[in-house]
Image (tube, rainbow, N blue to C red):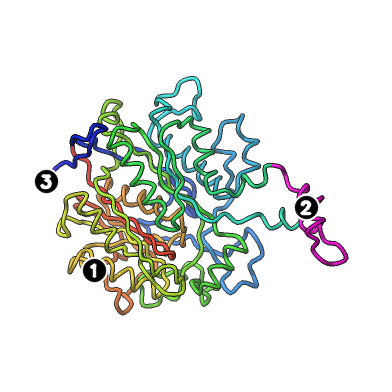
Amino acid sequence: MPERPSIRSGRGEPVEARRVVITGLGVVSPAGPGIEPLWQAALQARGTIRRIGLFDAAKFPCSIAGQLDDFSARNYVPRDYRKAVKVMARDIEIAVAAADLAFRDAGIVTRGIDPAKPQVDSKRLGCNIGAGLICSDLDELGAAVNTAVVSGRFDLKAWGSTGMTNLTPLWLLKYLPNMLSCHVTIIHGAEGPSNTITCGDASGYLAAGEAARTIQRGAADVAIAGGAESKLNPMGLLRQHLLRRLCTTRNDSPADACRPFDEGHDGTVVGEGGGLLVLEGLDRAKARGARVYGELVGFGAACDPAGIDVLRPTAGRLDLAVSRAMADAGISAGDVGLIVTHGTGVPGEDLAEAAAWRQALGAAGRTVPAFAATGAIGQLFAGAGGVQLALAAMALHSQTIPATVNFRRPADGCRMSFATESRKADLNYVVSGAFAVGGQSGACVLKRYEN
């Protein structure tokens, strides 16, 4: 068994770090709200990608996505807070819903669930959420812009004097990345350490790692952490197309489109969603008899400056992030029972990621069972890390390796051990990691819970 990690107190002397466990999973994905629909889709190797219905995408080269259907945060906020949903972008709504689902799954009553009987000290409740670039509502913005068109041309003076007044005074608050954490902390009364992390697809891992550190050093007892994002809008879709990342050859067969690490991979598919985890000090979790999905025992982060060239595939030094997370957990490659990958399905990115896992794990990078969720739900960007960690926790808790949708045979240079059917396994440690096109990466190690 690896030695328990130590940290330093405010006076500088080493002290034993608190153990951090996962007690709640809140997921919003194209499979449906909650972790269970997504987990069942993973077990059944069932994809959820389909034609885009939120807007007319018929003329886009890629017109398919992992879409949330009939979704609104109104179902996940207190009645007296529902008016605030009007000033929430879709990303914010996803985070708010995921937080509610996570706290309820953990069995923790917060102010947002019952303001009269909260079961957690607000001053000891933290929040770290990863967010992306939130796209403005084009219909809303366009209608206001049209009022500043004079003689067929956009007029800046007209925009400044009257056009801007056609936007609600709170308009900007819908599109600030920190508003995901802002609304979650307001609703649930989280007054502990709080942060917003905007490092693309790595954000959820960085948020979870930071939240775990606050609990380890005693700055919080409970924290909600992960990420959420929706790029399922015309601007988001267009940006990914211009970056040459999208699959454009399977609009007529959406379920088969995103093929992580597979020989048929030819691009990713935009998805929307997010995952938030309830992290808790083990001492507190045990005292209240909580169900424990697993223990977060390792965290690592890294960056590849080459990521500033977004057209050059890079895994953001994921190998370094994974190595650091494993060192933090005190484990070696032989201890790892499952790898939860990022797996965008973009050929160059898959190749770089597979190389990163081999660099971190050596020969075990080819043989350790692996899993990717993107074939089922698409690429969730800042929402990916939280969802991947939630699936990693479910795999550990249920001792099951889920199937990777659309994986049949590995592409050249991408040989890893993905399962085409789910199966039971003896899992002690799961390593999960992701990278962002901008060059950042993050990884976490989860351990099977033992008293």
Checking the image for residue 330, the label placed there is none
Of residue 20 and residue 159, the one placed in the foreground of this image is 159
Which residue type does callout 1 highlight? Arg
For the residue carrying disc 2, how many other residues have a C-alpha within 10 Å: few (<14), some (14-19), or many (20+)? few
Tag 2 residue: 160
Separation of marks 2 and 1 at Cα, in angstroms: 55 Å
Task: Give residue 106's position: percent from left, percent from top.
Answer: 37, 35
Task: Give residue 339's position: percent from left, percent from top.
Answer: 27, 59
Callout 3 secondary element? loop
Of residue 428 and residue 213, the one placed in the foreground of this image is 213
Q: Earlier in the sequence, mark 2 or mark 1?
A: 2
Callout 1 secondary element? helix
Checking the image for residue 1, the label placed there is 3
**Residue at (46%, 73%) from the top-left corner?**
267
Separation of marks 3 and 2 at Cα, in angstroms: 65 Å
Q: Which residues are magenta?
A: 144-169
Separation of marks 1 and 3 at Cα, in angstroms: 24 Å
Q: Quadrant of the C terminus?
A: top left
Tag 1 residue: 358
**Residue at (51%, 63%) from the top-left corner?**
270
